[in-house]
Image (cartoon, rainbow, N blue to C red):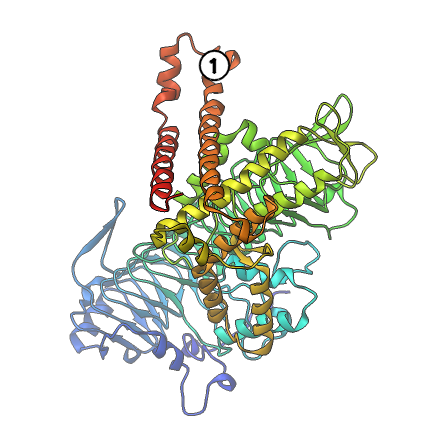
Amino acid sequence: MNQIKTFPITELGYNFIDKQYIPDGLDEYYLRNIQNVSGIEYTVLTASQLDTLIQNRNTSDNWNNVLVGPDFDATLVKNCKFYGLVRIGTLQPLYKEFHDFRIAVGIYNSTIISCDLGNNVCIDNVHYLSHFIIDNDVMIANVNELATTDYSKFGNGVIKDGEAESSRTRIEVCNENGGRWILPFNGMLAGDAFLWSKYRDDDELLQRFTEFTDKQFDKKRGYYGKIGERTVIKNCGIIKDVWIGSDAYLKGANKIKNVTINSDAKRKSQIGEGCELVNGIVGYGCKIFYGVKAVRFVMSSHSQLKYGARLINSFLGNNSTISCCEVLNTLIFPSHEQHHNNSFLCASLVMGQSNIAAGATIGSNHNSRSPDGEIVAGRGFWPGLCVSLKHNSKFASFTIIAKGDFPAEVNIPVPFSLVSIDAVSNRVMVMPAYWFMYNMYAMERNAWKMRDRDKRTEKIQHIEYDYLAPDTINEIFDSLELFKTLSVTEEGSAEVDGWENSNRKTIITKVPQAIKVFTELINFYAAHQFMQHISANEFTSFDDLKKSLSSKIKRSEWINIGGQLIQSSDVKQCKADIRSGKIDSWVEVHDFYRTAGTGYAADKLQHAYTSFLEINNITGKQFTAELLRSTLESALITKQWMCKGIHDSRAKDYSNPFRKMVYETNLEMNNVLGKLENNSFIQSQLEELDKMKASVKNIISTLKL
């Protein structure tokens, strides 16, 4: 039986906070008065204003509790019911227009319970508006319920006075059994989510993260919902316990409950038709459209959910797009793309710059014995069409997987590999360095595209987009060590054990070619860092350059912390500082990211230098001017074959007869695809090559190499 309580009508709009939770000497409006920073000086209604309001079929339980600002035009309030303390700013005989949506300034056909309304708001046909602070120039029309409870947390994983610990909102990322849960909070970064979910053997660290979150949001009951300036809300169902920034646009949403929607004039967030959002955080500049369902989630800035996408118990990194498909219990780093209705991503850690193709089933518990498995994928993860992967599986950076079912667990430790299934022989085939040998265009263009699409205005974390970076270089070194242990056939292939949990064979192909490419890439990486360092410091001699390089001889280890590469030693120290109290808030954790980002160029240079010494099997003393010159000249050759690879991999689309057969003439093909020679990305790469040639020539001349 529904428990429907009955109270006197005179209490409607009052007693928002239970008396036991109101500090001595204060009233139920004390937090509301702190929240309202409009600066409007409210006064009681004049006799003329009151008379006009009553004539316009407005009612109030107590007209003395309806306060108004200067230039309040009572004729612009019609057919409304007011309960509790209602404060209304200036209303003038105007109308406002937004995207061809026009509405008169004023309050019409609505029920208002204990709210503060700013200047020149437009409110029409809001059936139930309760306990909200609404800023100036807000437009709201045709909303069923817009209300706030006294225990509202606006999507943050905290508890209020009197609430049980079990009432916290948790996000169960990476694992369906909840063992890697995190508490969402406004301002949470991918690095925060990773640190919290990863180190589950460190109870003290985890407790400190909970304390940080609790400290950031107090436990007091009675905070009102907020709608920022110039926000437009129309034709929505239920909006409850929601904090909305300025300049947001909500149209046709079914339900938004316990959510923070960050938005401002430069980073506008939008939520569209048929969407349902519960228990989450929406970052700045996000777009959510057309039937999206998101529950227990954090959506980082400048990301999109579209076309019926489902995001549940998951964290979505910055500058990402998910359309149509279903994502459950997953932690996703920045720059993720997933566009197809029949793809599924579950219980995974995906480390960014990733793309999930149609039909991909990543981590389905239907092909596992229990819902406690995980998939860990390094950045640049590209499972192709109709790929099915089972928990537990792990993939090195920039793994691309061709169509196929993998009924057993997989561990691919070599980066830049193409993984496929030889159906005839029933073997797993792994081709290291595939991207560089056969798809250089996509490799280079994706790095450029993701960097170009980074719309963050506050870059707290320094996201690495280059495919050659400390993480991938270290994986390349590990791969080269692995290759030394293999028995390679004359055809250049070798069989390996332990890469798939099955009886079928796993074959690595083109091992000699991969060794050559990987060795060349390490030297190219070092040369590129040397050139940047020389340019930044304007060295005039090789000796000056060499003195600036650290004498450390060991290549450092790195961790991908939410898309930001940080040395393992620094992460270890950060965790120690958190446990000791030296780092005492999420703000200070974010300061750690900033500091690491500031020092990244120097740390990356040091890593490149030690990598260079190691791959060439020399000491720092053996690094000579002649060796630097030959390294720079070799890097030019590498850049040339990269540009050729970029051109040739794209040229296949113009020469392959099966691609050309849909066109009657070359002119038709060029009009559809654009001329190959006019491809702006290829042209930009050729320009980079020319700049590199000039730079190398200048360095050789300046340093007298």
Residue 111: x percent and y percent?
A: 36, 64
| Quadrant containing the N terminus in the rendered view | bottom right
Q: Is residue 675 left or right of residue 573?
A: left
Q: Is residue 72 left or right of residue 28?
A: left
Q: In the rendered view, would you say 572 is above or below 352? A: below
**Label 1: element kind:** helix
The residue lying furthest to the bottom in this view is 25
Q: Residue at x 46, y 20 (%)?
A: 651
Disc 1 packing (10 Å; few <14; some 14–19; many ≥20)? few
Q: Specify the quadrant of the image occupied by residue 167.
A: bottom right
Residue 597: x percent and y percent?
A: 45, 59
| Quadrant containing the C terminus in the rendered view | top left
Q: Nearer the viewer, residue 470 or 15?
A: 470
Q: Is residue 215 visible?
A: yes
Q: Is residue 321 visible?
A: no
Q: In the rendered view, would you say 162 is above or below 117? A: below
Q: Residue at x 53, y 41 (%)?
A: 523
Q: Nearer the viewer, residue 470 or 576?
A: 470
The residue lying furthest to the right in this view is 503
Q: Nearer the viewer, residue 279 or 205?
A: 205
Residue 424: x percent and y percent?
A: 76, 21
Q: How many marks?
A: 1
Q: In the rendered view, would you say 530 is above or below 578? A: above
Q: Is residue 617 left or right of residue 493?
A: left
Q: Specify the quadrant of the image occupied by residue 510.
A: top right
Q: Is residue 167 left or right of residue 667?
A: right
**Residue on which the image places disc 1:** 655
Residue type (three-letter) at the residue carrying disc 1 = Ser
Q: Residue at x 52, y 47 (%)?
A: 469
Residue 57: x percent and y percent?
A: 27, 65
